[in-house]
Image (tube, rainbow, N blue to C red):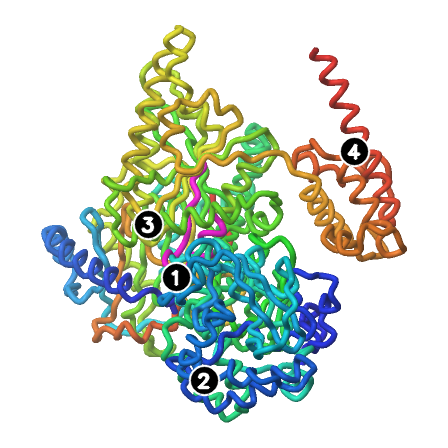
């Protein structure tokens, strides 16, 4: 097989990194049974599981390291019998029946328990360990217990046992507490490429774990899945987690019953509509430029490839393939944007996710120019790219932001398209398809616009055949003739209108430094602005209103000086996102990617693995041989705070040019040079400001 | 094959295409009648999407042709269009004579001209030569049902474009096919009779993109496959259809034929 190609594949569960307890946020507590967070078999979705319950009970007992106490079997019996017990148990463990409910946060419980509703504090006792869980219930009783419901469903307390009271919730008993709650996909997801569900399958190590101690196994899959959907998905939608819970339940049941269940599960999966609501993992398949294979064949092969890999950690890219067909046609297969919401890498169980495959081929030709013909002259008013373009490949990944700018932008467009598709009356709910990014220079506003256009073209390739990016040269729209500028703007937008008329294309209009086209009109009252400029603003505003009716257009604008922009334009922007200078963490990430690239090009040699900031945190910033260089880099990052992204990306170059000048350099030597060049940068800046001052 | 799209969208597209054809057939009727007078062929079976203002030049050959002939038709049409649309200062054949073997006078002239523009001419000529020779190898590899010559703008939204439809040609063996030069004469006669270039405005120097359809598995490595490409719907269009009078080949036969784009854009130049 291709063992060498998957360094991020999970090793067999017992050796999973992080299980040893160093990362409490995703490792379930020791003694946590594999079927723990799964709700008990639900009669509607999986009738066969009734037969499996004794085995499940055994598994749970084994996990606890004790003989199954009375009540284990009871807790794992199907819903019907459980609901019979509900009333009896209600006084003791008011939250127990909530296991019947899907574990999503804020999910309304259909039948609040007698006596439970007014309780603000609920005591759940767990007999074998004698632990008592205190679950804080906000108003609404069991219904509003939120993430707290997703505790490991230990067997309810046997009468007379476990009398101790614990004053506070035990954090390690709540592996799925709200911060780590699985973000369900956004409701708009089914709009995009028809999700390619993977058939239920059980990989090698998964099969192996059935035999071994279930207490240590099953941890991998229990971790919260990554964000999904177009925007990396988030938000309090219970449907996703419900689908997931049901799916997990089916898996649990099938594992309990053995291989014979597989077909039945497959059938069930197809019959269940909610399965398609499992988290969506976006897989981008980059075709070679000379590939002529059919998309369907490519998709099939990629699904086969992904089937061989059960767990991946965060974003991952395959570039080498065993399959001759794939290596002939595909440049890379990437699992993307799982880290947009959740900062750390998280293991993803591909079998539980819906895979959205986006197959694309890059356009190699550069920008063409859009000309406006005047009587005597030819004005190049815009540059025009056909997306996805080679030029913007990898741009999205290179942009590092602290706040969730990227996922917000993706989500914004998702909603825009959803509203257009559902024909929401735009007189009642207005949206303008205008995004305004503002902030200091060099923070990647324009790059982000271009990268977003590229990203969306790839993501929406099933809806739109191609994307078009039109970058308007705002300065060229000002005519030397008085009163002609407004007409030029109108002409420009007419051209754009022609492109929009092609419904196969997704059109992005990028107006860089938009303040030049939409300068505040009230400034002209003072007489400093010629009235021609006002006409330009008016033309732009009316043209934007014209354009917004079309569903396949997004207007992206950037600006450094927001206060100079006309209020009427700022009002029209749906998203006004501030893009600030990067924080220390982002700087560290940027430097790390720079060093990675230099090691790839063997300018930094020999190669040395550097730790990420997260890994440094995990070892508590302790200095040793492994972390020494990474600590130095984090020191440099701290020092570099205040520099813009553009400056940061050129510093490695300057470091080499000014302090190294040899074809190869060690990591340590390079970091020293980088440190020097950062100091120099600040020195220069100081001199510049004193000169000006 | 095209990407799987949501069914509704596909239906819509088909619908609009059908509507488009109906409309255009009405609006183009007078023009087509006039063109048909120059030819005996009945183009009503033509499935192409026609817009008002687009013109169609049907050419019927009285017998089968060979694949080298097909290549010649495409190459000669490209040269002709580039000259007619003012992207070349002289017809291609004269240019090659003029620039490749500079006579003493030409040499003097060149010296007078800026070195830079001379190099630009040479570069453009070399690129055109490259495309012609690669077209030849593409035709040798695969059947080419259609060739597109796109002027200005990008491949997706050109200012004007020319389509050569070879799908209805019957290929004969070497001995039995018509002579290529006779066919060429017939092709250009039809072009002149249709008077396709006279009413167009003078064109500025612009880029020319050449695209050709070929079989998916033909192993072409110079032309770049464009799996998603669709013939543009906007821009001035002239279609030249060649046929041998036989029954039309069903469209499904061309399912495995995809568009290939020449990786270079020919830059127009003037003296």
Q: Label 3 to label 4, Cα distance in Å? A: 54 Å
Q: Label 4 to label 2, Cα distance in Å? A: 59 Å
Residue B161: mark in rendering? 3
Would you say A676 lies left or right of A333 here?
right
Please report the bounds of the magenta region as a residue range.
A453-471
* Residue position for label 4: A678
Inspect this view and state whether residue B125 appears. no
Disc 4 and disc 1 in contact, CB within 8 angstroms: no
Check the picture and name the quadrant holding the N terminus of chain A.
bottom right
Q: Chain of mark 1?
A: A
Q: Chain of mark 3?
A: B
Check the image and report above or below for A227 versus A294: above
Upstream in sequence: badge 1 or badge 2: 1
Local secondary structure at mark 2: helix
Q: Are marks 3 and 4 on the same chain?
A: no
Inspect this view and state whether residue A623 appears. yes
Q: Label 2 to label 3, Cα distance in Å? A: 55 Å
Query: Tag 4: Cα neighbours inside 10 Å, few (<14), some, or many (≥20)?
Result: many
Q: Label 4 to label 1, Cα distance in Å? A: 55 Å
Local secondary structure at mark 1: loop
Task: Please tell me whether mark 4 or mark 1 is closer to you in this view.
Answer: 1
Residue A265: mark in rendering? 2
Residue drawn at (34%, 38%) of the image: A432
Q: Are marks 4 and 2 on the same chain?
A: yes
Residue A108: mark in rendering? 1
């Amino acid at each position: 097989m291709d063992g060498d190609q998957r360094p991020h594949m999970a090793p067999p569960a017992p050796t999973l990194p992080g299980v040893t307890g160093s990362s409490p946020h995703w490792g379930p507590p020791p003694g946590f049974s594999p079927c723990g967070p799964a709700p008990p078999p639900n009669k509607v979705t999986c009738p066969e599981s009734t037969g499996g319950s004794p085995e499940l009970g055994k598994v749970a007992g084994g996990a606890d390291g004790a003989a199954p106490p009375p009540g284990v079997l009871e807790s794992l019996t199907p819903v019907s019998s459980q609901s019979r017990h509900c009333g009896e148990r209600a006084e003791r463990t008011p939250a127990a029946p909530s296991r019947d409910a899907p574990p999503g946060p804020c999910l309304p419980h259909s039948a609040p328990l007698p006596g439970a509703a007014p309780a603000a504090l609920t005591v759940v006792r767990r007999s074998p360990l004698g632990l008592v869980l205190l679950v804080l219930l906000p108003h609404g009783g069991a219904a509003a217990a939120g993430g707290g419901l997703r505790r490991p469903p230990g067997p309810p307390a046997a009468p007379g046992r476990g009398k101790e009271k614990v004053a506070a919730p035990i954090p390690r008993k709540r592996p799925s507490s709200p911060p780590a709650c699985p973000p369900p996909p956004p409701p708009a997801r089914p709009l995009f490429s028809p999700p390619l569900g993977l058939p239920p399958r059980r990989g090698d190590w998964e099969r192996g774990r059935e035999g071994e101690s279930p207490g240590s196994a099953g941890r991998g899959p229990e971790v919260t899945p990554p964000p999904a959907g177009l925007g990396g998905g988030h938000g309090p939608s219970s449907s996703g987690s419900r689908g997931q819970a049901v799916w997990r339940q089916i898996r649990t049941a099938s594992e309990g019953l053995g291989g014979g269940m597989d077909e039945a599960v497959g059938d069930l999966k197809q019959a269940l509509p909610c399965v398609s609501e499992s988290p969506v993992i976006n897989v981008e398949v980059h075709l070679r430029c000379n590939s002529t294979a059919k998309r369907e064949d490519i998709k099939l092969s990629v699904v086969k490839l992904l089937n061989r890999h059960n767990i991946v950690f965060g974003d991952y890219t395959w570039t080498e393939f065993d399959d001759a067909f794939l290596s002939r046609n595909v440049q890379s297969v990437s699992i993307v944007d799982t880290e947009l919401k959740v900062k750390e890498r998280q293991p993803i169980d591909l079998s539980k996710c819906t895979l959205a495959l986006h197959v694309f081929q890059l356009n190699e030709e550069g920008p063409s120019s859009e000309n406006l013909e005047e009587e005597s002259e030819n004005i190049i008013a815009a540059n025009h790219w056909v997306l996805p373009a080679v030029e913007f490949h990898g741009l999205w990944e290179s942009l590092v932001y602290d706040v969730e700018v990227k996922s917000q932008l993706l989500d914004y467009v998702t909603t825009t398209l959803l509203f257009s598709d559902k024909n929401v009356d735009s007189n009642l709910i207005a949206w303008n398809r205008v995004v305004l990014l503002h902030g200091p220079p060099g923070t990647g506003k324009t790059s982000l616009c271009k990268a977003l256009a590229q990203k969306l073209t790839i993501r929406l390739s099933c809806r739109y055949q191609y994307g078009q990016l039109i970058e308007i040269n705002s300065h060229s729209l000002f005519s030397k003739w008085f009163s002609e500028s407004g007409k030029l703007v109108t002409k420009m937008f007419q051209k754009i209108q022609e492109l929009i008329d092609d419904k196969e294309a997704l059109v992005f209009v990028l107006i860089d430094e938009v303040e030049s086209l939409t300068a505040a009109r009230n400034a002209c009252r003072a007489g400093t602005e010629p009235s021609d400029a006002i006409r330009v603003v008016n033309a732009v505003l009316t043209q934007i209103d014209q354009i917004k009716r079309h569903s396949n257009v997004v207007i992206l604008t950037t600006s450094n000086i927001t206060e100079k922009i006309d209020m009427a334009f700022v009002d029209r922007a749906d998203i006004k996102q501030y893009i600030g200078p990067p924080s220390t963490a982002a700087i560290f990430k940027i430097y790390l990617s720079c060093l990675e690239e230099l090691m790839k090009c063997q300018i930094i040699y020999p190669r040395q693995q550097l730790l990420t900031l997260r890994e440094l945190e995990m070892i508590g910033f302790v200095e040793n041989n492994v972390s020494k260089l990474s600590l130095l880099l984090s020191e440099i990052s701290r020092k570099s705070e205040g520099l813009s992204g553009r400056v940061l990306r050129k510093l490695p170059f300057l470091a080499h040019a000014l302090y190294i000048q040899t074809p190869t350099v060690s990591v340590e030597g390079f970091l020293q040079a980088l440190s020097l060049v950062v100091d120099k940068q600040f020195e220069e800046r100081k001199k510049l400001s004193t000169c000006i001052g | 094959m095209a990407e799987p799209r949501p069914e509704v969208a596909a239906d819509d597209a088909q619908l609009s295409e059908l509507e488009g054809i109906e409309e255009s057939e009405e609006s183009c009727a007078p023009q087509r009648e006039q063109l048909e007078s120059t030819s005996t062929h009945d183009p009503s079976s033509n499935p192409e999407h026609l817009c008002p203002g687009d013109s169609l030049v049907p050419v019927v050959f009285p017998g089968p042709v060979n694949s080298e002939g097909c290549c010649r038709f495409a190459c000669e049409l490209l040269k002709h269009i580039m000259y007619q649309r003012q992207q070349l200062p002289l017809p291609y054949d004269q240019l090659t004579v003029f620039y490749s073997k500079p006579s003493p006078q030409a040499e003097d002239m060149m010296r007078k001209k800026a070195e830079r523009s001379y190099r630009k001419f040479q570069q453009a000529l070399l690129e055109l030569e490259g495309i012609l020779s690669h077209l030849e190898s593409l035709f040798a590899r695969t059947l080419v049902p259609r060739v597109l010559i796109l002027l200005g703008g990008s491949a997706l939204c050109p200012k004007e474009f020319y389509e050569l439809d070879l799908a209805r040609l019957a290929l004969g063996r070497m001995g039995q096919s018509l002579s290529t030069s006779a066919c060429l004469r017939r092709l250009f006669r039809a072009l002149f009779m249709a008077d396709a270039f006279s009413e167009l405005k003078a064109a500025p120097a612009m880029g020319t993109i050449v695209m050709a359809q070929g079989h998916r598995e033909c192993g072409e490595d110079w032309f770049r496959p464009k799996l998603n490409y669709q013939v543009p719907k906007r821009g001035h269009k002239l279609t030249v259809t060649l046929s041998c009078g036989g029954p039309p080949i069903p469209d499904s036969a061309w399912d495995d034929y995809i568009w290939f784009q020449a990786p270079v854009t020919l830059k127009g130049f003037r003296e």
